Image (cartoon, grey):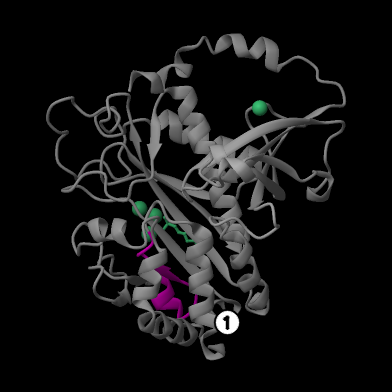
């Protein structure tokens, strides 16, 4: 495991000399895509003759799918189609990061390209102006396969002082969090906030509110930025939903509202949507983690601020429910609700697609 810190040990001050060299009119564009695991990201970079002004200026490209668990060697070329452009906080302006959808040689969406079908649902429900905000929890790991900063043998002091904690004995790895926040702002990711979590070395950032397909795009790029920053620091950001049995797990709470929910008296519509979600609980559980529900079996135990995976529940201000209605929303009688079931390693395209369909298209089925 020592290898995970290798690149962080290179002399980083040397970078400045080269990164500040002029690059003329040329532009570096880094294509980012989801690989065949459906949970890991890949990227590669090419030169364009000039700075792309929008997504149409960036050409389709391809990669070797046999090396990303996406195809076999005999027919390995896969296409990456740019869908969302961000500024590159590593190589700086005018260079870009571009999130891509992956397609097979026959132009069908790759097996783990869930953006494609998500986008079709989001187009269908456009008139509802559905907004999502996702709370990405994750755990920093050190080179020793232990959460970052944990003693090699034994455990840190029990949960209690760490959530939103300050001080060297409470906050493990804040440098990563602060650099990631700045990188998101620079890139153009709609980051909403961040906090230290209940388990030491566990952190959270939130993205949103974003309309429709944008939430998946922004969350995936925010994850990409996090992994790249962790590379520099020699730590790993794990999206495992339940790193340690007796400690809080990691979720990706998904906050949802439609135009109608945000308007006067919108609580009615929130309650109606929750009743639709109740009917489809098990279908949602199947797409709320990266293992068809098995990861959430470990996490949604009914303890540690979760509801049991086997029950569906909702209430105002209750963090032991599947769905929480924030207290302020209870008071205002309008706003949004929080689906607490999605796990940290979920695909936001699958989560938001399921929510949009269940809440807004159930009468069509
Ligand atoms: P929690 O109290 O559950 O920890 P956070 O402050 O971590 O909540 O996250 C709140 C999330 O709710 C953010 O991602 C934000 O974008 C999202 N959000 C706020 N207002 C709305 C809204 N009207 N519709 C959907 N999401 C919203
Ligand atoms: Mn090659
Ligand atoms: Mn939160
Ligand atoms: Mn949290
Ligand atoms: Mn939450």
Q: Quadrant of the N terminus?
A: top left
Q: Residue at x 64, y 38 (%)?
A: 186
**At 40% from the left edge and 79% from the top edge, which residue is drawn?**
277
Residue 5: quarter of image: top left
User: Which of the pair 335/292 is nearer the observer?
Assistant: 292
The spot of residue 96 in percent (x, y) is: 72, 36
Count every numbered label the image shows and give the total.
1
Q: Which residue is mark 1?
A: 260
Question: How far across and how far down the image is residue 342, in percent?
Answer: 39, 61
Res 49 quadrant in image: top right
Magenta segment boundaries in residue numbering: 328-342
Is 362 above or below relative to 320?
Answer: below
Sort mark 1 into few (<14), some (14-19) or many (20+) by Cα contacts within 10 Å: some
**130 or 297, which is in the foreground?**
297
- Lateral position of residue 127 relative to residue 352, left or right: right
Question: Is residue 330 covered in magenta?
Answer: yes
Residue 27 on image: x %, y %: 79, 30
């Amino acid at each position: 495991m020592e290898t995970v810190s290798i690149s962080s040990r290179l002399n980083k001050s040397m970078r400045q000399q080269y990164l500040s060299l002029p690059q003329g009119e040329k532009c570096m564009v880094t294509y980012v895509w989801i690989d065949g695991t459906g949970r890991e990201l890949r990227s590669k970079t090419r030169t364009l003759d000039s700075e792309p002004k929008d997504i149409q200026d960036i050409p389709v490209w391809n990669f070797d799918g046999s090396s990303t668990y996406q195809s076999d060697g005999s027919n390995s070329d896969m296409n990456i189609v740019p869908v969302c452009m961000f500024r590159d906080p590593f190589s700086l302006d005018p260079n870009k990061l571009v999130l891509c959808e992956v397609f097979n040689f026959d132009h069908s969406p790759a097996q783990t390209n869930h953006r494609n079908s998500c986008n079709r649902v989001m187009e269908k429900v456009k008139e509802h102006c559905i907004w999502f905000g996702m709370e990405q929890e994750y755990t920093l790991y050190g080179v020793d396969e232990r959460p970052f900063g944990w003693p090699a043998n034994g455990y840190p002091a029990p949960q209690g002082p760490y959530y939103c904690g300050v001080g060297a004995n409470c906050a493990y790895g804040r440098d990563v969090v602060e650099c990631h926040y700045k990188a998101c702002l620079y890139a153009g990711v709609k980051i909403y906030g961040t906090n230290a979590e209940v388990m030491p070395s566990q952190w959270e950032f939130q993205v949103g509110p974003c309309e429709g397909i944008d939430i998946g795009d922004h969350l995936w790029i925010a994850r990409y930025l996090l992994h790249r920053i962790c590379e520099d620091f020699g730590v790993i950001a794990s999206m495992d939903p339940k790193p340690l049995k007796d400690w809080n797990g990691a979720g990706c709470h998904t906050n949802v509202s439609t135009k109608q929910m945000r308007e006067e008296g919108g609580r009615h519509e929130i309650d109606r949507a929750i009743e639709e979600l109740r009917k489809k609980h098990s279908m949602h559980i199947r797409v709320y983690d990266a293992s068809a529900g098995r990861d959430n079996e470990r996490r949604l135990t009914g303890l540690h601020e979760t509801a049991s995976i086997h029950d569906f529940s909702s209430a105002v201000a209750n963090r032991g429910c599947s769905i929480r209605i924030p207290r302020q929303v209870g008071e205002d009688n309008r706003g949004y609700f929080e689906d607490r079931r999605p796990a940290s390693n979920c695909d936001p395209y699958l989560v938001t697609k399921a929510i949009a369909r269940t809440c807004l298209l159930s009468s069509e089925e």
